[in-house]
Image (spheres, grey):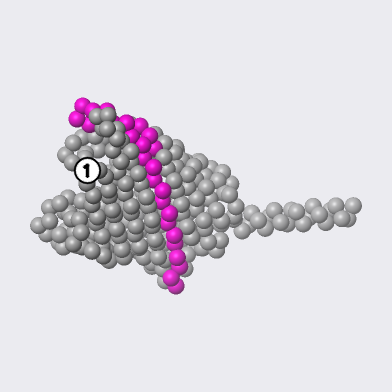
Amino acid sequence: MKKIYTSIFVLLLFSISAHAFQVNNFNLKVGSSYNIEVNQSQEISQIIMGNPNTITTENTSLELLDVESVNADGNYTLRLTVLKQRTAVSSPMMSMVEDTEDPSTGSGLYGALKNSSYSFLMSNKGEIISISGLDEVKESVKSQLSGNLQALSQVDVLFNEDMIRSTLELRFSYFPESQEMNWSENKTMTMNAMPIEMATKYSYENNYTIKAASEITIDATTVQMGTNVELDLTGNQDSFYRLNEVTGFPTSFESVNNIIGNAAAAGMLIPMTIETDTKTTFTLQN
């Protein structure tokens, strides 16, 4: 009987310990900094007037995130700085490259982005409370692009606050409000100036890995090259967050999404599929 009680006690102790070490909030050190490296591949396949058209996009970026302060409520002030950014778009109709390291390519927009930064306030649960400094960034970037109408037209899109907030939420808003192992959340994100509805089911795969399975709906009108485009798309996204067990900060974030539907433009109905693969790594610098 003593052996049975001992076994039960050991199992109970292990269960309590495992639960206690489940990371469920941020515990960041002021003064620490992280490199954030993103590699993203996207393929859009369309049928336009019976002809197939494929657009491939490769995005890479390197950013620096500094933990500047923490207030009495446990909210962190963080600063994000663009170090490098490159986008390469290829299709049968055109190709384009924007690169911070080669401002002579493309419109020259990315050259003006280098070393730009803004701050945001984040709770220890990953809620993005506020974003500051975007107006100053836009003013600085626009001053460098004076007279470059093509590049200037993109500045407000790149630094749209709703889109910035959505990007930050995808990276950092993954903790449950309480001790759940499984939970759900519905939210509207902004990507490429479009509202995207995401219904997400989260679950702990282990103490430091969170899986997010999302259903995506896009029912919106956007403007492409001066033409209104109505989108009716649905799909899914599977994401994994691997976290540091002490700080709660991600070490990596990976997502794959597949979207299918139609775009209507200039009297044409254009079937399309969109496949996007994103890998983000977070490396502590100090």
Residue at coordinates 50% horizontally, 50% vertically from top-left? 240
Residue at coordinates 21% horizontally, 39% vertically from top-left? 223
Magenta stretch: includes residue 194: no
Residue at coordinates 26% horizontally, 45% vertically from top-left? 91
Residue identified by numbered label 1: 93
When asked about the image quadrant of residue 73, the answer is: bottom left
- The percent coordinates of residue 79 (x first, y second) are 35, 64
- In terms of secondary structure, where does tag 1 sit? loop
- The percent coordinates of residue 281 (x first, y second) are 44, 60
Q: Which residues are magenta?
A: 259-286
Residue at coordinates 39% horizontally, 42% vertically from top-left? 275
> Can residue 283 be seen here?
yes
167 sits to left or right of 153: right
9 sits to left or right of 190: right
Mark 1, Cα crowd under 10 Å, few <14 / some 14-19 / many 20+, is few
- The percent coordinates of residue 232 (x first, y second) are 33, 31
Look at the picture and state if 102 lies above or below 238.
below
- Give the dominant element type of the magenta stretch: helix, strand or loop: strand
Considering the image in quadrants, where does the C terminus appear?
A: bottom left
Q: Foreground residue, 126 or 215?
A: 215
Identity of the amino acid at label 1? Met
